[in-house]
Amino acid sequence: MTVVEECAVRTVDLGKTYGDAPAVVGLDLAVPRGVTFGFLGPNGAGKTTTISMLCTLLRPTAGRAFVGGCDVVAEPHAVRERIGLVFQETTLDLDLTAREALRFHAELFGVPWRESRRTVAAMLDLVGLTACRDRPVREFSGGMRRRLEIARGLLTAPQVLFLDEPTTGLDPQTRTVIWEHLHRLREERGITLFLTTHHLEEAEHCDRLAIIDDGQVEVEGSPAELKAEVARDTVLLRTRDDADAVRLVRERFGLEASAGPDGVRLSVADGAAFVPKFCAEAGIPVLSATVTPPSLDDVFLHHTGRTIRTERSGPLTVDDVGRRR
């Protein structure tokens, strides 16, 4: 079996340029089958452009891409038969009932009537919407609509389900429910989940992550591997004299520190070991101490020089323009 056949998604030097403006540059991915793979990056990083190319909605201007072993340019119909797609913005007809929305989608894909009745019922049950199957979609909450869109994406038994910012605009509790459904369907059906996100908490659900910024992948690995690479804890100390504490951290421990409204902040390899050592040697009363292990935001900062929450400056990208429409 070739590498392309082994992978759910494989890209080689994939790129997309609009005029002189590159949106995606030199993308090389090898996503194994049956995993949850995430693209983590801020708005405008190239996530939606990439997923649009992989789903045959945009034609690449460089490189090649394969989904389910099929070339997205040479075999677009075969790719579409192998994928499901949940768009970032809702595309449901609000006047249809949940059952009607799924049956309409099944008819568009040529699913026989008897088979579609059975499949629609199974999908509604999978996402917990059976009791609401005859209610119009306009009466659904944001979380219910998202679950219905996931059911629609699964209707044709795809090998890969693409989810573009799957929980954008949802409250934390609803996000948790959505992810419970996603984990369950992957376990039951063995499909590959390929998602884009700028939510750090959501990225933690992935088996593997690619951090993307300005159209290029900066680093790839599991969340644990990426955080281990940073390998420094953040320590926050509140003391009787924060200015003197900063001086002592620098002079006695050889570490950089800064004082702010919330206390003295520094990074150190082993925060749990540093705190009692500082308390014993500094001679300054410590009122409180907090140790935070590396986060994915720290990883993003390490590789890009800014946090993922930093507002993008400069001209709008194609992704930015698409979101504002």
Image (cartoon, helix red, strand yellow):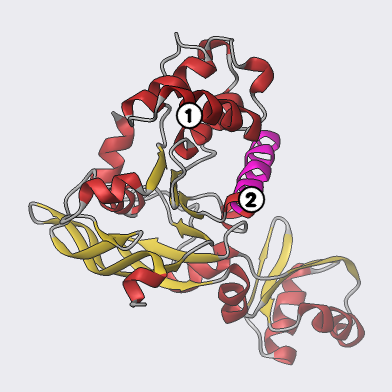
Marks 2,1: beta carbons within 8 A? no
- Residue 316 shows in this picture: no
Q: Is residue 325 above or below residue 45?
A: above
Q: Residue shown at 64%/16% (left/top)?
A: 132
Q: Is residue 21 above or below residue 130?
A: below
- Residue 216 shows in this picture: yes
Q: Mark 2 points at which residue?
A: 188
Decide whether residue 174 is among the magenta residues: yes
| Relative side of 286 to 142, left or right | right
Question: Can you say which quadrant of the picture contains the N terminus?
Answer: bottom left
Decide whether residue 114 is among the magenta residues: no
Find residue 151 and name its label.
none
Q: How crowded is mark 2: few (under 14 residues within 10 Å), some or many (20 or more)?
A: few
Q: Mark 1 points at which residue?
A: 115
Report helix, strand or loop for mark 2.
Answer: helix
Closer-to-camera residue (204/323): 204
Task: Point out the stretch of residues depicted in magenta.
Answer: 172-186
